[in-house]
């Protein structure tokens, strides 16, 4: 139940769709190596590949109801499925399995799209009504599981990963320079962007209906900052943090296979591991990335947590060569331009996790967004107060902001202070918090010839959000993080796209609706926010060594251009050769080559963050072009063992289709 | 003064010409960030043997090549007359 695909086109017969749906499934076979299944009808086909986690014996998909009318292909988990099942049983539903798939299907049949608000989980699914021919697609509220769709002529295609569309020789992948400009500007795609022309990502918190070839989208939930409980004291806040996180971890441990934890060395994943251990009958398995380059390494803290909790710990050592050698494969799985190399070690870590026999892991993603862990939030508050602060306070607060950046040190702080004058008032409506960060994106957009204004799309996006203008500056910053960096990179490129490249499902206890709601109630209520995530840390003081509890936020990063400068892999010809670059007309070849030559030849200390970032964008855009647009170097997809194949035209449940059956696109 | 232009063209991967004049705001154009700005200040101080005072630094930034060249010319002139 870890990857879905489908085709809707009234002009194609069930038989003609059978081969295509199997090839689509094969392209995402890595997501669910335990089995594949599909259902075909006249004008429609969908299928799933499965990583068997809950009720492995009876959760085979596609799943149907007793009548055989509704069919479900489902990726993800609804963690509160037992509670929903009880409610549905009280309403008269009868269940045949212990699997959450059956709960999802019955919830939709019983409540319709209203069921989505009740789901606490990470999911994307397709549901087909064979009586009406209607198709519904839905995605979870935080965007944990992906879902892409494309309309081509009369057909609508959908898939967990865009690579499934490679099935069709006449499906032309074209990188979209306007979207790329936006992606480079704000670092990650907006929720609807895919980077390719004509392919949409279904945004988080939305569902979609396809009726008679027409698509309509609907929002079932969005981020609210005023739905949390009333909390009157810090002691109550700490109790609630412990209670809600404990419950969240407990729910995410629901699995019929062993669940491990990714330990970063920071406090968030250490808390998750602590709580997971409380519920584990045997030693918890933990996994970490260890860097040969000590600048990025957090091994001592990882070992400290592992020893403190007595976990069975696995550490995956990563060298520059490992990063350079794995980049093409990792970018193929990411499908998206990337601004950092930090996702590549996660590709290798998931491989290790799979080799050690673990299919499900918990991680600390989402804590920084909920509990204000990023320096960005402090920076926003500082810039907002800038004009009211005396000079000495400006400087002292600035020095504490980015201690890992050498130019924020005492020697240069006066110049940086002067620079911040420029950023104390809002220039782009609604984007105040991110204006300094977006400077780097502005630089990256120079990779594109005649680039569309990089912030045009995100300005329209925030302007269209009801209630956004009433958020505080920090809430706006959070909202932007929940809509861009978190789903567009951390949960996808660095998160589930890497874990599922080796059949590992990641779960995020901090991305729980109750945990998020609580955080909105207590953030900045009992402190000034200068110690990031203070309440979260204090809630678990005593459960973890103080060295971990008091550890300052250490951004997870990996060697960027330095890895490629050291290794010089052959595939760098995609950006060093004029002939290769000329194949991508929208890339500014002159700037690209100057940048590449600089970052690959100068000492790492001379390369700025924005140059590293822009180099990674260039490399990933070029490799995506080679793989998806030119279709070079593609490996033959392999279909997992076929567990279910249903042809509704042979069961008497087919939808009466119209028209002559012809080609797909 | 061509040294400043050369340094910036090399350092920030730009070329000043009619489409990108010396009056361009380097921050608005996405050419400069805090790291680059510090690199530039260090270069100017070393190359032209000048010193920016705290007040000059904290008072605001030089945003264009034109402004940087004017400031450096003024400071080197002040130094030679003092």
Image (cartoon, coloured by chain):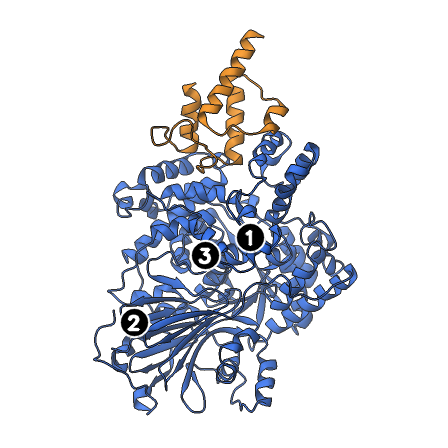
Q: Residue at x 40, y 29 (%)?
A: B9
Same chain for mark 3 and mark 2? The answer is yes
- x then y, percent, for residue B2: 40, 20
On the image, the x and y values in percent for residue A476 come to: 57, 53
Query: Which residue has dot 2 on it?
Result: A155
In three-dimensional space, the C-alpha distance between marks 1 and 3, rounded to whole angstroms, equals 31 Å
Label 1: which residue?
A: A290
Give the side of residue A516 with respect to residue A449, left or right.
Answer: right
Q: Secondary structure at mark 3?
A: loop
Foreground disc of the pair 1, 3: 3
Q: Are circles 3 and 2 on residues that touch, CB within 8 Å?
A: no
Q: Check disc 3 and report the residue beneath it.
A: A190
Q: Residues within 10 Å of mark 2 (few under 14, many from 20)?
A: many
Q: Residue furthest top?
A: B81
Q: Position of residue A264 (x, y in %)?
A: 59, 56
The one nearer the camera, A432 or A434, is A432
Q: Which of the chains is orange?
A: B
Give a yes or no on whether discs 1 and 3 share a subunit.
Answer: yes
A169 relative position to A196: left or right: left
Q: Quadrant of residue A420?
A: top right
Q: Quadrant of the C terminus of chain A?
A: bottom left
The reply to whether callout 1 and callout 2 are in contact (CB within 8 Å) is no
Spatial CA distance of label 1 from label 2 is 46 Å
What's the residue at 51%, 22% (across, down)? Answer: B44
């Amino acid at each position: 139940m870890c990857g879905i695909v489908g085709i809707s086109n009234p002009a194609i017969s069930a038989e003609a769709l059978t081969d295509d749906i199997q090839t689509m499934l094969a392209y995402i076979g890595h997501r669910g190596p335990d089995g594949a299944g599909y259902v075909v009808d006249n004008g429609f086909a969908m299928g799933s590949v499965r990583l068997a986690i809950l009720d492995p014996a009876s959760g085979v998909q596609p799943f149907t109801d007793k009548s055989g009318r509704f069919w479900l292909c489902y990726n993800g988990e609804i963690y509160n499925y037992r509670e929903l099942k009880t409610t549905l049983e009280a309403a008269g539903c009868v269940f045949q399995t212990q699997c959450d798939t059956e709960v999802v299907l019955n919830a939709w049949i019983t409540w319709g799209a209203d069921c989505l608000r009740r789901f606490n989980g990470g999911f994307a699914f397709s549901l087909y009504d064979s009586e009406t021919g209607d198709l519904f697609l839905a995605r979870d509220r935080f965007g944990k599981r992906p879902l892409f769709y494309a309309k081509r002529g009369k057909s609508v295609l959908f898939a967990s990963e865009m690579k499934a569309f490679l099935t069709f020789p006449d499906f032309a992948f074209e990188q979209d320079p306007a979207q790329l400009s936006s992606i480079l500007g704000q670092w990650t795609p907006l929720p609807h962007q895919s980077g390719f022309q004509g392919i949409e990502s279904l945004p988080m918190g939305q569902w979609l209906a396809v009726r008679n070839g027409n698509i309509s989208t609907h929002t079932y939930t969005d981020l609210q900052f005023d739905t949390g409980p009333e909390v009157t004291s810090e002691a109550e806040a700490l109790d609630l943090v412990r209670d809600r996180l404990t419950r969240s971890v407990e729910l995410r441990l629901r699995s019929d296979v062993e669940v491990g934890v990714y330990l970063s060395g920071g406090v968030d994943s250490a808390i998750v591991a602590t709580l997971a251990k409380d519920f584990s009958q045997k030693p918890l398995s933990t996994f970490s990335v260890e860097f040969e380059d000590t600048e990025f390494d957090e091994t001592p803290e990882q070992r400290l947590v592992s020893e403190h909790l007595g976990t069975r710990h696995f550490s995956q050592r990563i060298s520059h060569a490992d990063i350079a050698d794995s980049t093409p494969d990792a970018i193929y799985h990411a499908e998206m331009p990337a601004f950092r190399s930090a996702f590549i070690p996660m590709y290798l870590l998931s491989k290790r996790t799979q080799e050690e026999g673990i299919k499900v892991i918990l991680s600390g993603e989402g804590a920084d967004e909920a509990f204000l862990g990023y320096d960005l939030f402090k920076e926003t508050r500082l810039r907002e107060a800038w004009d009211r602060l005396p000079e000495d306070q400006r400087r002292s607060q600035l020095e504490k902001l980015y201690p890992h950046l050498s130019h924020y040190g005492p020697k240069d702080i006066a110049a940086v202070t002067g620079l911040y004058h420029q950023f104390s008032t809002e220039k782009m409506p609604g984007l105040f918090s991110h204006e300094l960060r977006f400077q780097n994106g502005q630089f990256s957009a120079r990779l594109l010839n005649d680039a569309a204004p990089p912030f045009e799309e995100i300005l329209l996006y925030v302007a269209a959000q009801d209630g956004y203008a009433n958020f505080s500056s920090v809430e706006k910053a959070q909202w932007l993080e929940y809509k861009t960096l978190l789903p567009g990179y951390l949960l996808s490129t660095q998160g589930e796209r890497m874990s599922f490249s080796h059949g590992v499902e990641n779960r995020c206890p901090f991305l729980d609706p109750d945990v998020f709601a609580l955080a909105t109630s207590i953030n900045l209520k009992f402190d000034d926010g200068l110690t990031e995530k203070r309440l979260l840390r204090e809630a678990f003081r005593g459960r973890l060594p103080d060295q971990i509890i008091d550890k300052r936020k250490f951004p997870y990063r990996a060697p960027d251009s330095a890895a490629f400068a050291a290794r010089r892999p052959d595939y760098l010809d995609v950006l060093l050769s004029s002939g290769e670059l000329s194949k991508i007309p929208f890339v500014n070849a002159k700037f690209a080559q100057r940048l590449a030559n600089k970052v690959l030849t100068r000492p790492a200390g001379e390369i700025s963050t924005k140059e590293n970032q822009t180099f990674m964008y260039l490399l990933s855009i070029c490799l995506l072009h080679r793989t998806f647009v030119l279709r070079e170097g593609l490996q033959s997809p392999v279909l997992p063992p076929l567990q279910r194949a249903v042809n509704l035209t042979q069961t008497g449940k087919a939808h009466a289709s119209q028209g002559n059956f012809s080609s797909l696109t | 003064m061509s040294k400043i232009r050369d340094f910036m063209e090399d350092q920030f991967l730009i070329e000043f010409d009619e489409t990108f004049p010396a009056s361009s705001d380097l921050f608005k154009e996405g050419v400069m960030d805090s790291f680059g700005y510090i690199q530039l200040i260090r270069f100017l101080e070393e190359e032209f043997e000048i010193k920016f005072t705290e007040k000059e630094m904290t008072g605001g930034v030089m945003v264009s090549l034109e402004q940087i060249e004017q400031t450096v010319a003024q400071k080197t002139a002040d130094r030679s007359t003092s």
